[in-house]
Amino acid sequence: MQNFNFYNPTHIVFGKDRLGELDNLVPKNAKVLILFGGGSIKKFGTLDKVTKALKDRIIIEFGGIEPNPRFETLMKAVDIVKEKNIDFLLAVGGGSVIDGTKFINLAANYEGNDTADLLLNYSASKTVVKSIPIGTVLTLPATGSEMNSGAVISYNHGKFVVGSPLSFPTFSILDPTLTFTLPPSQVANGIVDTFIHVTEQYVTYPADGRFQDRTAEGILKTLIEISEQTINNPEDYDARANLVWSATMGLNGLIGSGVPQDWSTHMIGHELTAMFGIDHGKTLAILQPAIWKIRKEQKREKLLQYANRVWNITEGDDDYIIDSAINKTREFFEGLGIKTYLSDYGITADKIENVITALKKHGMTALSETRNLTPDICREILEIAL
Amino acid sequence: MQNFNFYNPTHIVFGKDRLGELDNLVPKNAKVLILFGGGSIKKFGTLDKVTKALKDRIIIEFGGIEPNPRFETLMKAVDIVKEKNIDFLLAVGGGSVIDGTKFINLAANYEGNDTADLLLNYSASKTVVKSIPIGTVLTLPATGSEMNSGAVISYNHGKFVVGSPLSFPTFSILDPTLTFTLPPSQVANGIVDTFIHVTEQYVTYPADGRFQDRTAEGILKTLIEISEQTINNPEDYDARANLVWSATMGLNGLIGSGVPQDWSTHMIGHELTAMFGIDHGKTLAILQPAIWKIRKEQKREKLLQYANRVWNITEGDDDYIIDSAINKTREFFEGLGIKTYLSDYGITADKIENVITALKKHGMTALSETRNLTPDICREILEIAL
């Protein structure tokens, strides 16, 4: 097992009918900026419940944070935070809203000249020493942002990772019933996102992290078990609760502690989203099977373990077992209604070189757990993903 | 899944050669009370390394915290904390030292007239609002105290549970190499303690907590896999690291979130330790198989799941499968060198009534996940444990 630090102070408030507890969770005299995305939290009454629970606190609303939240949009909220002396940020939404809120907090407290440096230079966020507390009310299980300190922000045709220990939400309310109204396609995207968060931390090389491996496998098996049920019967509480908790646990630092981590699927996927507008979850579903095929040797032992323990595939020679597990994974994604080839999204071979150029521009030239996934290997991956 | 809150702010510093980081983890101007047990941390050089890492901070030492730490001993440390204006408590040891340190913190900041009320009245600890930060350097993997807010303290021939959100360690250094010098019997006790922490939160009744169940099973399987290796080859780093991390994760709130919890094995076991001086881990090894036999109907579904998933027992009728899993569990404990019957410790049938009387005196009359394990049922359990 590798040395590691684990720290996660977010208070999770999980279950039915927990919104009323906002009155205890948010300081009494707080001036609250509520941040959200499109209109669904208005349409389904969540925003009303939130404002009611906050009683007579001063509340300002900031809506319109888009999927893949944009720097320019978020900077408008930063202005409000500064002008109005906001002292509590309440994100009500999915990963994009929560990520955006984390960035708003860092940007509002950043003392450098150019706020975009927070995105272009990962160490810039380390200079931020003040923080506004963040609370979240989760409405979409997918990114795990509700219990981690990271965020992904879109800027100038790229997606950039930012984060700081100051970015952990103070609390997150995870009420699975608030996710019942999600369209099936968003639930499916969230399942794939969670699945790949786990495989990025698990299908690498052996490091004898037994708790970590078994916990990762437990999340993957849970997703496989409950996905059809939670897509077809969105109001099945237990199925949805298991999805919500799996999504949170998949990216809160726990399963990646003390073991190697890959993240090449995410880094290449970010380029596909930035360039072609493909949903984040769908980019992962396209890339993961292709990466595993090309990186079979580097990942052989863990791919075998994945095949054996997650899919119960034990018969046949090792290559057959691994190929079967990759096929099973692709079938799982397709079964959720998510296409797994670039051509399904109208991406043709002539576009690949643009992706390679963007990866190089963004410094993504030595990816994966072994830091040897080069742009040339990325090209191979994209070619077999066509 | 049941509603739950999860909050755990302890910063884990895990791995080889991490003691030097104490200089960054403990505030620069802190006046530190180092708390420890017997002489082993002096004998093996850990105390020297700790004091060296703390550089020129003012340090006071308080040794002699015994296994099952006693109120009277701890109150001597409370006097020192108050007299010397200590502002950092550094526990260097196992669960007893860490539990004792948590109590010292609460007691030093308790404003009530009689500090023993903290033990006799569980809600008394909730009146404590101030806190001295606690750090820990773990030397014995077993209780999970390094990453939770609970403590068990001995007082007036009883063992009492105390705790508060203020009791979480700020940080815990978990260096598996610091545990290499432990005697095999203490390692074996720690393995059983961890095993039963997990079963108390897992072998109850089904609540569809899939992440929780699979994570619990992962810890149990890990313990079964590595126990022989880590007892026979104490310096096998990875085996010991897996034990240390399993022990921490077994009782940090994670696997018990959203699912029923039992704890009858612990509550009855505490009486056996207080009355007969049997090691905590050994009392659990005696009681768990007996409790499962007597409570087979209440626990039928989860016992079957335990048999199937942890021990891979799937052939035969349900009763055979469950009985086989109980036998396997007993054999596992015996294989660690831990005897599993009361008579092995010289306890005879005529002592049982004394245990029942003590349980009643301590209010332990409605135990288990279903709150219907009465003193009469305890009597049956102790009789078949003879």
Image (cartoon, coloured by chain):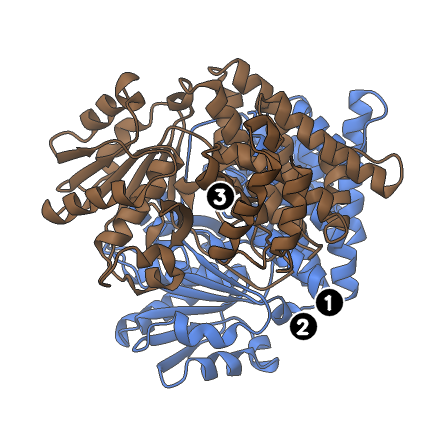
Chain colours: A blue, B brown
State the residue in front, A316 or B79. B79
Q: Is residue A166 left or right of residue B114?
A: right
Q: Where's residue B371, x and y in %?
A: 61, 60
State the residue in front, B87 or A67. B87
* Distance in Å between CA atoms under marks 1 and 2: 8 Å
- The answer to whether tags 3 and 1 share a subunit is no
As shown in the figure, which amino acid type bears the numbered disc 3?
His
Split into 4 quadrants, where in the image is the C terminus of chain A? top right
Q: Is residue A363 left or right of residue A306?
A: left
Q: Is residue B152 left or right of residue A123?
A: right
Q: Which residue is mark 1?
A: A234
Q: Nearer the viewer, mark 3 or mark 2?
A: 3
Q: Which residue is mark 3?
A: B270
Q: Which residue is mark 2?
A: A181
As shown in the figure, which amino acid type bears the numbered disc 2?
Thr
Q: Please, which residue is most extreme toward the right here?
A: B316
